[in-house]
Image (tube, helix red, strand yellow):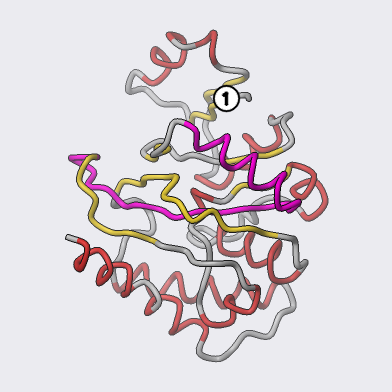
Amino acid sequence: MEHIIVDGGSTDGTLGVIQKYQSSIAQWISEPDSGLYDAMNKGIRMATGDIVGILNSDDFYTERNALSLVAECINREDVDTCYADLAYVDVGNIHKRVRHWQSGNYKRRKFRYGWMPPHPTFFVRRAIYEKYGLFNLDFKLAADYELMLRLLYKHNVSCAYIPRYLVSMCTGGACKPGPSNTFNNMAENYRAWKVNDLSPNPLTFILKPLSKLPQYARFARRR
């Protein structure tokens, strides 16, 4: 297992933390980038392992054996990708869950009804990135959606579901809910289908934001 850290030239003490744990880090860089997805592409290119997972700076694995579960799933199911469930936590209190993203079993056709896996839980064989490409930097908000649509729907890459909450993600960020972000995401989601020469269900882009509503309702019932 290798840990690769891609930092965008932080000046907040990040480098000191990296250097403190240098012996446990396979590779790291700290330099300006062209945004989140550019940083992700840098990390993927640096990776030498068979399976690549991406963890953002305010995300964390909820189980100590999360990566073992991923490796076991991919090997047992003989697939090239897998995903799991995601918990949103309060940015000021990571022990407080505010929303659950329960992904459900994988069915390729679900993309036409607004479905997608939570990207922080998405693991991909490195050979798949090498074959079908990395994140498309023309997308500022939905490059993760475009990537998963391209891999899973367009190229029908094999995929499996791990019914466990493997990643916790802090609320907020570039894609936080709001009218402006929702509209911009819908526009990029539409463009993701077009750049891949795919014909979407006309309702896909309405159903996609609506599909998140049960995440809040499900959490409210559990509380």
Relative to 216, 34 lies left or right: right
Circle 1 sits on which residue? 3
> For residue 100, what is the image quadrant?
bottom left
Q: Is residue 40 magenta?
A: no
Q: Residue 223, image x and y in percent?
A: 17, 60
- In the displayed image of the protein, which residue is found farthest to the right? 131
Relative to 27, 8 lies left or right: left
Q: Residue 212, image x and y in percent?
A: 36, 71
- In the displayed image of the protein, which residue is found farthest to the front? 76
Residue at left offset 27%, top offset 48%: 89
Q: Which residues are magenta?
A: 65-94
Q: Residue 19, image x and y in percent?
A: 46, 10
Amino acid type of the residue tagged 1 in the rendering:
His
Q: Tag 1's secondary structure? A: loop
Position of the N terminus, as image quadrant, is top right
> For residue 61, what is the image quadrant?
top left
Q: Is residue 93 magenta?
A: yes
Residue 127, placed above or below residue 83: above
